[in-house]
Image (cartoon, rainbow, N blue to C red):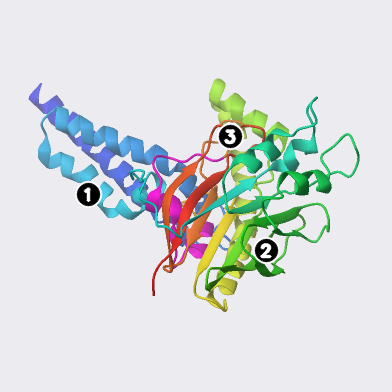
Amino acid sequence: MRHFGNILFLVVILANALCTLLLLLVAYSPHIAPTVHPVESCMGLTFPIFLVLNGCFLLFWLVVQKYKAALLPLTGFLLCTAQIRLYIPINFRTDALPEASFKLLSYNIMGFNGATKQADGTNPILTYLQKSGADILCLQEYITIEDKRHLTQHDVEQALKAYPYHRILSVGHNKGANKMACYSKFPILSARTLSYPSDYNGSVLYELKIGNDTVTLINNHLESNKLTLEDKAVYTEMLKDPEKEKVKSGLRLLVRKLAEASAIRAVQADSIASHIARRSHPALIVCGDFNDTPISYTHRVIARGLDDAFAQSGRGLGISYNQNKFYFRIDNILTSKELRSYNCMVDRSIRESDHYPIACYLSLQKK
């Protein structure tokens, strides 16, 4: 019996070692270039899985009082503390906001959900923006339809008349198919699109005058994962009925599409990072729909030298995509060291878009 116990212990410790190794591999996968290894670069999607498994091993060793063995999963956690902090931060809300702080909201509005109007002539997304209390609205997938049955640009401007400044630009090579908008209570000095290959996605760089400072703001909508409704249905069915062959064929399809999109986003992320490095003013905000998780090449490259507002002042997973059981935070607000974030949150109170809005208060740091 003792011999059997030793074998069992060895098997469990080896399984734990493999799990910890995979956790570290996944945690550092953002350093893998998607253009060279597109499939491997998607490993960050599995980070929460290995995080939970490693936690289960730690709990197991503590329960059976094998404290030396518990050092193995604990070491894994310590070696990826930064990634854990980024993925699931724990911060407390504060009411002590700096006097000159302002609120920024980033939201993929999904074309105002088809630019539809309710019976009373209102649109829930537009009403939400109107009541948000934000000083700057950064909107992705901004589309209006110029007829009386739908939401028009005039309707939007009337509802958002508290924002005297706004700029709306088309992005992607398929002009007019996707637009980005910034509505601001601060003067918008300039606005231009950033050049990188994409049919429907893109980024817009604004310069805003906030107090005595000029702040660069980059609003992004990066390449989507190109999953069709059928692909998403396959994923949902896999979760409901994890039959071996169904999972095998479904995973092959999903991984191929995710890898292709990851490689495209990598080029876009590199381009955005180069524009960040060449900006004219030190104070910088980067926000929008990255279509990638915090543990990804896209996030690592764009956020290099910047603070993630959710990691700095948010709490929990901050899941910002709300469709088809894809539970990830893919919307972001990043800032340079000249700004500090407070009370960053993903607002799950509105579901009219396939994204939740992300917002935080920002304060320019005294020089």
Per the rendered image, the range of residues in magenta is 297-320
Quadrant, the N terminus = top left
Task: Give the structural element (helix, strand or loop) at label 3.
Answer: loop
Which residue is depicted at the point 71% across and 59% down? 166
Q: Horizontal and vertical percent for residue 149?
A: 88, 34
Q: Residue at x 52, y 67 (%)?
A: 284
Viewer-nearest of discs 2 and 3: 2
State the residue in front, 205 or 342. 342
Q: How far is the residue under mark 1 from the one under mark 2?
A: 42 Å
Above/below status of 278 relative to 324: below
Name the disc covering residue 322, or none: 3
Q: List the residue tagged with mark 2.
A: 204
Structural crowding at the residue carrying mark 1, measured as other residues with C-alpha within 10 Å and reported as few (<14), some (14–19) or many (≥20): few
Image quarter of the C terminus: bottom left
Mark 1, secondary structure of its residue = helix
Task: From the image, tell me which residue sits under label 1.
Answer: 75
Q: Front-most of 325 and 216?
A: 216
Instruction: Residue at 49%, 75% (x, y): give it.
Output: 282
Confirm whether the magenta stretch covers residue 315.
yes
